[in-house]
Amino acid sequence: MPTRPHLLYAHRARHSRLAAALSCLLAVCMLAGCAAPRIAGRAESEQRLSPCESAVEAASAGTERAMSADSPITMRYVAAKQAQHDWLDVAVQCPLRFAEGTMRSAQMQYRTQQLARVLGANSKTLTVTRLDSVASVPIGGDALAQAALADDRAGFATEVLAGRFVSGVARDARTTPLAEDGTLLAMSENHKQAASQMMQLSNGARDLRQKLYGTDELLAHSTNVTDPVNGLRANTVAVVEMSCAREEMQAIAQSTRTMELPDDANAVQQAQQGLLQLSLLAATHAYTAFNLGYPSSDYAVFAADDDE
């Protein structure tokens, strides 16, 4: 029985389509076989965070936990205690975030002490008042001279205020005890010594210190004064300390933006250690201000950044 022509043509058409499909599949398989093999770990390495990014991520997460009202107080305390260190890492690892890392470390230091008092815990502060152990810093001489000026001015101001409170001309519940037990004079001496040490590290930069500064504001407002940066009224010593912290951070941050670390690993470690001590010094001034009643909230301490 002869095959019907239309069935033969249909069979041949199906056969042609099947052959074409097989050819396409074979071509795809060959191309897949020739594709470059995946290098193990390549995607992971491309997603790996830089030291700066890792520091910011850890510090931000810790701060969020430390400030969360939903977390148990013990967890908040542990988070704040770690975050104060993590923000210092940000200051050292991130050239563009020195000031932020320093100030946020001071905030977390203050938060740690607040929570420690509630828990009855004994938490050591990260205070640095002088640069006795620093042999070198990766900061330009002019920036160090500006920072030295800030510390020297603060040393003069605290000395003047100590004299007024010791003599009884001015009285304040926060400041009077500091004057009477010698704390204010010790603060003054530490400021001046830190300024001298920064000038020694400045490689011959022009010394901007004046030793004597205007006293009109200090004499007129010995107990409380308005911070010109944000308009907040606070304890005068607290404003002196916060102003010193800001000026130091601003001067050093200008230099870290163009900072170049050495190639030698030991030299890098020494440079970062010096930068850490500068960060701790400025953070200590801010932390002292918080302890004297200066607001530690972002609206107060980052007001200058918002205006820029």
Image (spheres, helix red, strand yellow):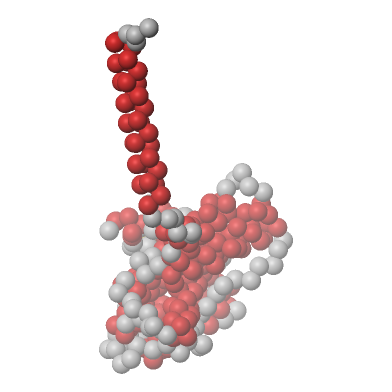
Asked if residue 177 lies left or right of residue 31, the reply is right
Would you place residue 71 above or below residue 160 in this image? above
Quarter of the rendering containing residue 76: bottom right
Number of labelled discs? 0
Task: Say which of 190 and 257 sits in front.
Answer: 257
Residue under the point 60% across and 79% down? 181
Residue 222 position, x and y percent, is 43, 70
Residue 139 position, x and y percent, is 35, 81
Is the C terminus in the top left, top right, bottom left or bottom right quadrant?
bottom left
Task: Say which of 245 and 18 sits in front.
Answer: 18
Quarter of the rendering containing residue 156: bottom left
Would you place residue 72 above or below residue 108 in this image? above
Residue 16 position, x and y percent, is 31, 26
Residue under the point 32% across and 21% down? 12
Residue reaching furthest front?
A: 1
Is the N terminus in the top left, top right, bottom left or bottom right quadrant?
top left
Task: Say which of 119 and 289 sits in front.
Answer: 119
Q: Could one spot residue 48 in this view of the protein?
A: no
Residue under the point 32% across and 82% down? 140
Asked if residue 214 lies left or right of residue 108, the reply is left
Residue 239 position, x and y percent, is 42, 67
Q: Could one spot residue 277 in this view of the protein?
A: yes
Asked if residue 205 lies left or right of residue 175, the reply is left
Task: Say which of 242 and 95 sits in front.
Answer: 95
Residue reaching furthest right?
A: 120
Residue under the point 35% across and 18% down? 11
